[in-house]
Image (cartoon, rainbow, N blue to C red):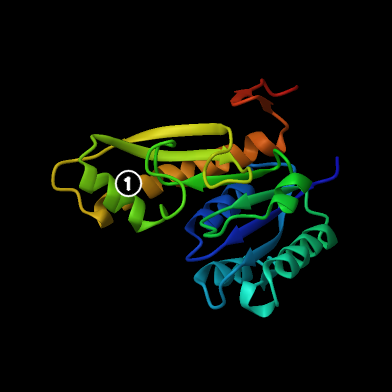
């Protein structure tokens, strides 16, 4: 069986990228490989992680192009040239254009550091999410993996896991515990995606049994 080809898109340190790399190397995720890592920012550590794992990396920034249309057209061209089957957004801080979402419908997943629909959408990313959680005083937060649609954090939810907010938590302490959950959920979601075990019915995503 031909291996599925994944593009991982990043904007920062790439710890979730590393979790996927480790899961593939260990055999937890089978039948795929990361064909390319794409960053929308130059000099991020995620590209170093890719280089260290022998994975091709590239930087595609909007500033290189005259407008968003040209940028998105080039991004889609790179994905097609690399024969990408699935796209994983691992700390990618940008909204994908409708033409990219449409070309990879239910083949793009994203990890978000809260229990969607709480603390998500435009402006909620990274430490901003955890600060909002603490400012609001909720007792539970967590992480969510979802399919990507044309809006911010609104696609069908695949996996969620709660994280208890503890008395005295800071943004750093809370984000560390949430990140530990992210590092488990995202590789699992990639595994299920590659195995063809995610079925979407409207807003509901069901997980089917693995075929023997």
Q: Residue furthest left?
A: 168
Q: Residue at x 58, y 33 (%)?
A: 156
Residue 70 x/y as whole percent: 75, 69
Q: Secondary structure at mark 1?
A: helix
In depth, the one of 80 and 2 nearer the eye is 80
Q: Nearer the viewer, residue 81 or 26?
A: 81
Note whether 25 is above or below 185 in the view shown.
below
Q: Looking at the rendering, in which quadrant would you find the C terminus? A: top right
- The x and y percentages for residue 2 are 85, 44
Q: Is residue 11 left or right of residue 88?
A: left
Q: Residue at x 38, y 38 (%)?
A: 118
Q: Is residue 157 above or below residue 101?
A: above
Q: Is residue 129 above or below residue 212?
A: below
Which quadrant holds residue 102? top right
Identify the residue at image location x=81%, y=60%: 82
Residue 89 locus on image (x, y percent): 59, 52
Q: Position of residue 86 (x, y in %)?
A: 72, 47
Q: Nearer the viewer, residue 75 or 165?
A: 75
Left or right of residue 14: residue 7: right
Q: Residue at x 46, y 52 (%)?
A: 122
Label 1 environment density (alpha carbons within 10 Å; few <14, some 14–19, many ≥20): some
User: Residue 57: which quarter of the image?
Assistant: bottom right
Image-based side of 132 in relation to 80, left or right: left
| Residue on which the image places disc 1 | 177
Where residue 127 sits, quadrant-wise, is bottom left
């Amino acid at each position: 069986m031909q291996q599925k080809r994944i593009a991982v898109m990043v904007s920062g340190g790439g710890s979730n990228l590393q979790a996927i790399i480790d899961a593939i190397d260990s055999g937890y995720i089978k039948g795929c490989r990361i064909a390319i890592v794409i960053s929308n920012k130059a000099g991020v550590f995620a590209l170093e992680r890719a280089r260290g794992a022998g994975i091709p990396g590239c930087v595609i920034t909007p500033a290189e192009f005259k407008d968003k249309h040209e940028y998105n057209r080039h991004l889609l061209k790179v994905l097609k040239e690399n024969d990408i089957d699935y796209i994983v957004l691992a700390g990618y801080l940008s909204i994908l254009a409708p033409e990219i979402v449409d070309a990879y419908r239910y083949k793009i997943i994203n990890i978000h550091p809260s229990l969607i629909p709480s603390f998500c959408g435009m402006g909620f990313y990274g430490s901003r999410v955890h600060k909002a959680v603490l400012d609001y005083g909720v007792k539970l937060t967590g992480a969510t993996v979802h399919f990507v649609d044309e809006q911010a954090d609104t696609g069908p939810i695949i996996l969620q896991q709660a994280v208890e907010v503890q008395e005295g938590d800071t943004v750093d302490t809370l984000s560390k515990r949430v990140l530990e959950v992210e590092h488990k959920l995202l590789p699992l979601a990639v595994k299920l995606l590659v195995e063809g075990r995610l079925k979407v019915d409207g807003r509901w995503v069901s997980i089917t049994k693995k075929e023997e």
